[in-house]
Amino acid sequence: MKAKDFIAKVTAMAQPVCAENGLDLWDVTFEKEGRNHVLTVYIDREDGIFIEDCEKVSRALDPLLDEPVFDSLPPYTLTVSSAGF
């Protein structure tokens, strides 16, 4: 699976998770950092993001990312972060 296809699938999975939690999905990236790959989901909300928001999104996405369709990807770390504004 190509990185852009992976990002599109993760975006489609993350949007309803964010909406259910009153969050905005800002961006999704999949980058190689040294030997490691990192999938980062950036979230935002008007009144700010708290660590609990990141945990909720991470825990909701984690089992979805274990689907066999993603088995061809290199090992990666999932990170959920504030958009940082």
Image: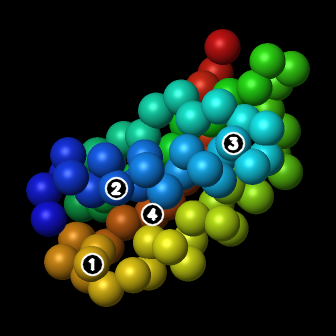
> In the rendering, at what x and y percent does residue 5 appear?
21, 52
Q: CA distance from mark 1 to mark 3?
A: 24 Å
The amino acid sitting under disc 3 is: Ala
- The disc, 3 or 4, on the residue closer to the chain's N-terminal end is 3
* Quarter of the image where one finds residue 2: bottom left
Frontmost residue, 29 versus 21: 21
Answer left or right for 12 relative to 15. Answer: left
Q: Are marks 2 and 1 in contact (CB under 8 Å)?
A: yes
Residue at mark 1: 69
> In the rendering, at what x and y percent does residue 61 appear?
57, 65
In the rendered structure, find residue 77 and report the number of the disc placed on it. 4
Q: Residues within 10 Å of mark 4 (few under 14, many from 20)?
A: few
Frontmost residue, 22 versus 55: 22
The amino acid sitting under disc 1 is: Val
Residue at mark 3: 19
Residue at mark 2: 9
Q: CA distance from mark 2 to mark 3?
A: 16 Å
